[in-house]
Amino acid sequence: MSPVGLAEWAYSLSESLLSEPLPRRWAHSLGVAKRARSLSSILGRDAELLEASAVLHDIGYSPSIATTGFHPLDGARFLRDQEGADERVVRLVAHHSCALLEAEERGLRHELETEFDLERPELVDALIVSDMTTTPTGEHTTPAARLDEIVQRYGPDTIVGRFIQRAAPEIYAANERVEGRMAAAAARAQPR
């Protein structure tokens, strides 16, 4: 697959897996991709890579590919095994939004970390921020509001509720790092 067509391929694949069975998840994925595009000034040549990863990050929820019930692992395995996807996209999907912590809650941490390496920290941060500043319906929100929404939707004592509460400090830290990089990029772009 040529790098030029990466985003187009990703949108098409994600739509085919999510739009009909999970229209709300598809709307969220489109919103996450839009947010990823808004970070392009700090991503350089990896902007399209992040956008593709963003629109694909939740494909593991698709009933046609869900096997373990842990969507980062299911999505990454599908991308690797069925699609032969770019390994960097696969790694970002596998590890999106502090997935290792949720994998630990599910007893799948060893599988996730041995099958899929982590991607560059700047890209991991950018995908965390893209996901954690997008509502389930694809609108922009704050990390605090998004975390509250997830805890309320799943419940504080569920696997997802426990994981997201444990992940909160890293999500806030990633947001601060991305905001700092965005501010620095904006300052560099100002005429002197």
Image (cartoon, rainbow, N blue to C red):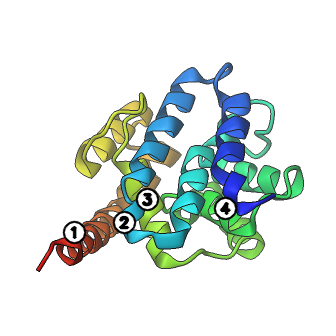
Q: Which is closer to the viewer, label 4 or label 2?
A: 2
Label 4: how many Cα within 10 Å (few below 14, some 14–19, many 20+):
many
Q: Disc 2 or 1, which lies upstream in sequence?
A: 2
Q: Which residue is mark 3?
A: 128
- Image quarter for residue 105? bottom right
What residue sits 47% from the left and 59% below the top?
127
Q: Which residue is mark 2?
A: 41
Q: Which is closer to the viewer, label 4 or label 3?
A: 4
Q: Position of residue 172 (x, y in %)?
A: 28, 63
Q: Disc 2 or 3, which lies upstream in sequence?
A: 2
Q: Amino acid at mark 1?
A: Ala
Q: Which is closer to the viewer, label 4 or label 1?
A: 1
Q: Disc 4 or 3, which lies upstream in sequence?
A: 4
Mark seen at residue 186? 1
Q: Secondary structure at mark 1?
A: helix
What residue sits 70% from the left and 66% below the top?
112
Q: Secondary structure at mark 3?
A: helix
Q: Amino acid at mark 3?
A: Ile
- Above-or-below relation of 72 to 101: above
* Distance CA(mark 4)–CA(mark 2): 19 Å
Q: Amino acid at mark 4?
A: Val
Label 2: how many Cα within 10 Å (few below 14, some 14–19, many 20+):
some
Query: Is there a contact, CB below 8 Å, between mark 1 and mark 3?
Result: no
Q: Disc 1 or 3, which lies upstream in sequence?
A: 3
Q: Is residue 167 visible?
A: yes
Q: Amino acid at mark 2?
A: Ser
Q: Which residue is mark 4?
A: 89
What residue sits 80% from the left and 31% below the top?
64
Q: Is residue 70 visible?
A: no
* Distance CA(mark 4)–CA(mark 1): 27 Å
Q: Quadrant of the N terminus?
A: bottom right
* Distance CA(mark 2)–CA(mark 3): 17 Å
